[in-house]
Every structure is written in structure tokens, then in C-alpha cells.
Amino acid sequence: MTDMNCPTTLGADLPLDDRGLAYGEGVFETILVRDGVPQLWSQHMARLTRGCMRLGVAVPSDAALIACLEVCGGRGLEVLKLIVTGGSGGRGYKMPDQPVPRLRARAMPFAVDHQARRGITARVCELRVAEQPALAGLKHLNRLENVLARREWTDAAISEGLLLNVRGELVEATSMNLLWYRDGRWYTPWLDRAGVEGTLLTALSAEQPIEKVRLGIEALLAAEQVVLLNSVQGIWPVTRLLDSEGECLNEWKQGKSPALDIVNKRVACLLGERAD
């Protein structure tokens, strides 16, 4: 067993000529591991494979990827981060003729944020995400937009920030996907031009209808329920939404919501939790 009081890493440090370090060429996955069992493994591996193929990076073998689980302690909740880079490439953007990608893994202990699962305050970010269909949906290594957006606030009472594109259409949160409920239907933004196609969103979409739309912030203001989700944190209901200046745009009362109850139970099942 591994001592999970501190992070455990598989693989040596990256050299300065690594293309992931130099150019952000590569992909990563952040996976919830429960008692040694990775959750949504097939969805994570599918996205990792899709990302590598689109970037022209060789996909690690199944055996190499499964071996990364050795960094996990095997008890309780952990987060496993897998990173695949384009390998060393010398100077310049041109990919080497025979690139040798690198696979790295790191595991850290994790605790569920029960307070956030009861409801959070979110804000609308000033930053507008760029659109690049060639990279849309992927969890590639260049997350500078998300880093800049997350720097916009320091108030600990604000848990997440919502990102829009240059046309003012909803995309996602800085580290989570976005869902909202109105008139008996769940909605989520299209992620074919920008954003990350989350594995939990993908798995949940296979369990129930979720309509993809291109709408602005006004869609949330008219919603009966707004939630954020990802494969590590699960579901975070938004109970208060602020603009970028801190003014309240809308509030949602914490109460009985049959639609949210159904989603919570499905997410709990997908993440290996006991659904009460």
C-alpha cells in the first residue's frame, strides 16, 4: 500500500524539451478512485484516446494506463491524474519524425465537499473563451484561459466561475460542466467550439435526455435549477449567481427538487456512491 498522506507520482520529472511542458502538447485526465477502483474509467480512457489522436500523440497502451493505478493507495477516496505529453522534440513547433510520448501519473487523497453539494455561489467571469473547434471538447494541457478566469476572484464564498464565449453564449465553469433545468427538461451548452466535454456529463447524458443549446446567461436566469458537475466533485447546485462585479443576478432556494433528486441519484450511482 502507498502512504497517501502525501502525493505519489509515477515517472521522472519532465525534461525542458518536453513538448507538453514547452507547448502544452498533450492531454490529461483527473479520475476519482474509490477504494482502488477508478470511476468512469471507460469514459476517461475514451476522452484521453480521442485527445491523443486529435493531437497526433501516440496513445499509451492499455497496460501502461492500468499500471498507473499502482500510485493509488487502494483505500478511501483519491484523485488520480494522468498526463500524456508529446515527448521531447527539440527546438521549434514541428513534431519530431518519431515522437516518443511520455505518460505520468500522480495520486492525491480526496474528500467530498458536502457543503458545496448543498449549494454554492457562482459568478460570471469577465474572461471570454476563444473558440477552436480542433481542440473543443478535449482536456488538453493548455488551460491558461481557465487559470486566468480563476484569478478573477479571491472571495472564499464564491466556489466557481461561469465562462462565456465572445458571443456571450454559455460554455462551462472554470473546472466543471454546466446544466440547468426548465419546464421539465435539462439543458447544457454545446461544446463543439470551446470547452471540455466532461466524462460525468457524457455518462449522465447516456442515462437521461440533456438538450444541447447555444444560449446566454438569460437562460440561467429563467431556469428552475442550475447545477455544476464534474467526475471528481459530483453535483454542485448553484443557489446564488453573481455578475463579475459581485451583484446578485439570481437566487435559487434550497428545497425539494424531484428533477435534481433524480440527477443526484444517477450521478451517485455513476461515481460509485451509495444513493440514499
Image (cartoon, rainbow, N blue to C red):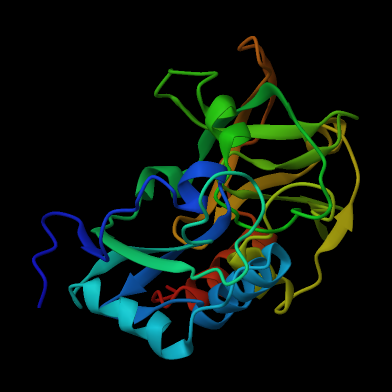
Which part of the image, by quadrant, shows the N terminus?
bottom left
Residue 156 drawn above or below residue 176: above
The residue lying toward the viewer, choosing from 96 and 64, is: 96
The residue lying toward the viewer, choosing from 253 and 33, is: 33
Q: Residue at x 11, y 71 (%)?
A: 2
Q: Residue 124's image quarter?
A: top right
Residue furthest out toward the bottom: 63
- Residue 101 location, x and y as percent? 49, 68
> Can residue 7 be seen in the rendering of this structure?
yes
Task: Answer with left or right where residue 13 lies relative to residue 178.
Answer: left
- Residue 50 location, x and y as percent? 68, 72
> Can residue 184 be seen in the rendering of this structure?
no
Q: Residue at x 79, y 42 (%)?
A: 223
Badge count: 0
- Residue 70 location, x and y as percent? 24, 79
Residue 168 drawn above or below residue 29: above
The residue lying toward the viewer, choosing from 25 and 124, is: 25
Residue 226 drawn above or below residue 98: above
- Residue 11 location, x and y as percent? 27, 66
Task: Answer with left or right where residue 269 lies relative to residue 226.
Answer: left
Which part of the image, by quadrant, shows the C terminus?
bottom left
Q: Residue at x 76, y 53 (%)?
A: 136
